[in-house]
């Protein structure tokens, strides 16, 4: 199991980086036209507590997340997520997560839960993908705290191998949980994410995250 501060983590310099990611969708059957549905602005800035990771979706999606993590261990420190008109505010202390959940026109609900292992925040999957010890076939179980569900997930990260499908040397990393899988392409030298495709297991519906000048890929 991969835990915060594990020796297997090779955390790159995340500070002062940013990305504007175009998000495309594609159905698995029928009309398979690729459609641009949103943009996501991602940034990493130094803060007093570590590194402040921000993720902001453009409409029609309603999601804005600010997560502070320790620069060396990727241990989560604090997080504020606004998602579908609900505000989640959390403090992380290893296996202990506290905070409040605020629904519209309702009093904040206190959250206080201790899990059996130290957790990562679900919204730091991308920094984790960038920080793995890349070795073909390596697979790790990752304890992720789901901000929306308030529950612990034990998901997997698998290093599938190397590729040059984007024209540069890259590693393929697969994330899987009970609902989705995501295939990441990570630059082998800079450890920057080049491309990602998330597939819903039940429906086969795809979200393609095109980083920088990457173009949407066809299904199949």
Image: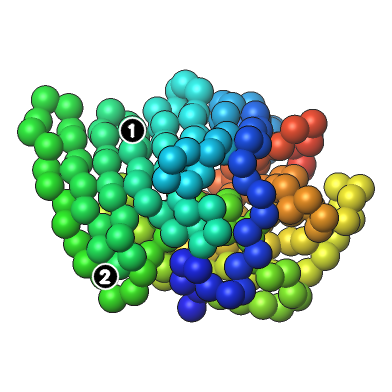
Q: Residue at x 43, y 40 (%)?
A: 48
Q: Can you tell which mark lies on residue 31?
A: none
- Residue in the foreground of this view, choosing between 150 and 189: 189
Q: Is residue 168 left or right of residue 146?
A: right
Of helix, strand and loop, which one carries label 2?
Answer: loop
* Up-down relation of residue 198 to residue 54 (above or below): below
Q: Which residue is mark 1?
A: 82
User: Where residue 213 sits in the image (x, y, percent)?
Assistant: 79, 31
Q: Which residue is mark 2?
A: 115
User: Where residue 112 sits in the image (x, y, percent)?
Assistant: 16, 57
Question: Farthest residue toward the left?
Answer: 107
- Residue in the foreground of this view, choosing between 103 and 17: 17
Q: Residue at x 91, y 48 (%)?
A: 167
| Count of numbered circles in the view | 2
Q: Residues within 10 Å of mark 2 (few under 14, many from 20)?
A: some
- How are the colours assigned in the image? rainbow
């Amino acid at each position: 199991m991969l835990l915060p501060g594990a020796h297997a983590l090779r955390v790159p310099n995340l500070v002062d980086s940013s990305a504007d990611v175009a998000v495309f969708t594609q159905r698995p059957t029928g009309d398979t036209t690729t459609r641009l549905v949103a943009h996501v602005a991602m940034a990493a800035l130094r803060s007093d507590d570590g590194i402040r990771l921000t993720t902001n979706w453009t409409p029609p999606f309603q999601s804005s997340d600010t997560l502070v993590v320790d620069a060396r261990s990727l241990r989560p420190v604090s997080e504020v997520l606004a998602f579908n008109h609900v505000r989640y505010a959390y403090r992380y202390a290893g296996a202990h997560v506290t905070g409040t959940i605020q629904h519209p026109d309702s009093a904040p609900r206190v959250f206080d839960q201790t899990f059996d292992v130290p957790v990562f925040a679900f919204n730091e999957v991308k920094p984790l993908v960038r920080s793995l010890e890349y070795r073909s076939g390596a697979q790790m179980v990752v304890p992720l705290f789901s901000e929306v569900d308030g529950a612990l997930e034990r998901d997997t990260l698998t290093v599938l191998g190397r590729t040059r499908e984007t024209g540069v040397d890259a590693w393929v990393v697969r994330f899987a949980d009970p609902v989705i899988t995501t295939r990441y392409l990570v630059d082998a030298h800079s450890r920057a994410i080049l491309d990602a495709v998330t597939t819903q297991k039940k429906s086969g519906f795809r979200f393609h995250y095109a980083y920088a000048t990457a173009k949407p890929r066809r299904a199949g």
